[in-house]
Image: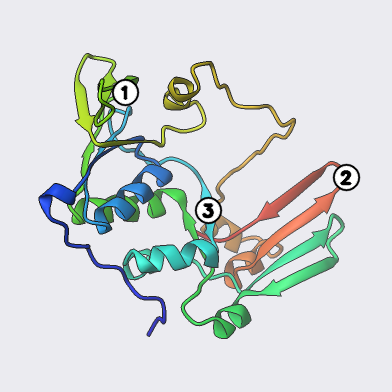
């Protein structure tokens, strides 16, 4: 059994319960929703997209976050979608291993922790299901363009593009890298900062990889690999 305790919904009197409005139904927004729901508050999540779609590629969940997901009661449903890499390798760009870490050994040393790889859509699906299971409300087609705080500062209202309004005691902005709420909070434009880095990601069919003698080992024995080179790096992660 996992030594990490699973949290249960905290009972609160109605007078102590907050109405929480969360803007954005990505991983951060849904994670915030689960945390607030387990703390005994009511939650509505406003998402600008017309519907929740399958977005993204692979994502790694390491012990600092897997402990949180376990405490939220997500392990059992997540494990259906997981790949369990044996280790992580940092390699010279010509292939030699520079350093490596055995994930299975680490898990045995720290019971309850785990290293899992997922398609982002699978992780997102599990978070969404858990938030709804706990009583959260997810409302799509709800693009928030403004925020109004009451004169006495006790309530906050999210104003949507079509004029609808959602009032709450607490508003959490989780609307992504092009966040409208961060601009409202700062009182100025807040565009993403260019880092000079570019990331190219792609998904390969494991069936096709199994046909290639050089790629087959990546499927048969999942490992995370990073090849480090001058001004660039490449990585393969897992079969999904």
Q: CA distance from mark 2 to mark 1?
A: 42 Å
Q: Residues within 10 Å of mark 1 (few under 14, many from 20)?
A: many
Q: Which residue is mark 3?
A: 59
Q: Earlier in the sequence, mark 2 or mark 1?
A: 1
Mark yes or no: residue 81 visible: no
Which of label 3 and label 1 is nearer to you?
Answer: 1
Q: Residues within 10 Å of mark 2 (few under 14, many from 20)?
A: few
Picture coordinates of residue 190, whole percent (x, y): 55, 22
Question: Helix or strand or loop: what does disc 1 sit on?
Answer: loop
Q: CA distance from mark 3 to mark 1?
A: 26 Å
**Badge 3 vs badge 1, beta-carbon distance below 8 Å:** no
Describe residue 102's horizontal placement relative to residue 15 as left or right. right
Picture coordinates of residue 221, whole percent (x, y): 61, 73
Identify the residue at horizontal 31%, vertical 67% (top origin): 73
Q: Which residue is mark 2?
A: 230
Which of label 2 and label 1 is nearer to you?
Answer: 1
Question: Helix or strand or loop: what does disc 2 sit on?
Answer: loop
Q: Earlier in the sequence, mark 3 or mark 1?
A: 3
Q: Residues within 10 Å of mark 3 (few under 14, many from 20)?
A: some
Identify the residue at horizontal 11%, vertical 50% (top origin): 14
Residue farthest to the left, as pictured: 14
Describe residue 122's horizontal placement relative to residue 62 as left or right. left
Q: Which residue is mark 1?
A: 143
In this orientation, which residue lies closer to the viewer: 237 or 65? 65
Query: What is the number of the mark on residue 36?
Result: none
Colouring rule applied to residues: rainbow
Describe residue 2's horizontal placement relative to residue 33 as left or right. right
């Amino acid at each position: 059994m996992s030594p990490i305790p699973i949290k249960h919904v905290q009972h609160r009197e109605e007078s102590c319960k907050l109405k929480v409005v969360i803007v954005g139904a990505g991983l951060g927004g849904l994670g915030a929703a689960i945390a607030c729901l387990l703390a005994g508050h009511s939650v509505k999540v406003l998402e600008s997209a017309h519907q929740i779609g399958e977005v993204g590629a692979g994502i790694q969940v390491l012990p600092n976050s897997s402990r949180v997901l376990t405490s939220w009661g997500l392990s059992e449903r997540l494990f259906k979608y997981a790949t369990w890499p044996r280790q992580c390798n940092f390699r010279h760009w010509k292939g030699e291993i520079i350093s490596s870490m055995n994930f299975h050994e680490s898990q045995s040393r720290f019971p309850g922790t785990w290293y899992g790889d997922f398609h982002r859509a699978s992780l997102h699906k599990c978070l969404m299901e858990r938030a709804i299971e706990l009583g959260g409300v997810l409302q799509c087609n709800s693009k928030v363009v403004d925020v109004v705080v009451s004169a006495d500062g006790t309530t906050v209202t999210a104003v949507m593009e079509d004029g609808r309004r959602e009032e709450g005691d607490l508003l959490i902005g989780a609307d992504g890298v092009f966040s409208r709420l961060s601009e409202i909070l700062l009182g100025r434009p807040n565009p993403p900062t260019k880092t000079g880095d570019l990331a190219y990601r792609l998904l390969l069919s494991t069936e096709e990889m199994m046909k290639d003698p050089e790629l087959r080992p990546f499927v048969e024995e999942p490992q995370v690999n990073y090849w480090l080179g001058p001004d660039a790096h490449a990585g393969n992660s897992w079969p999904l």
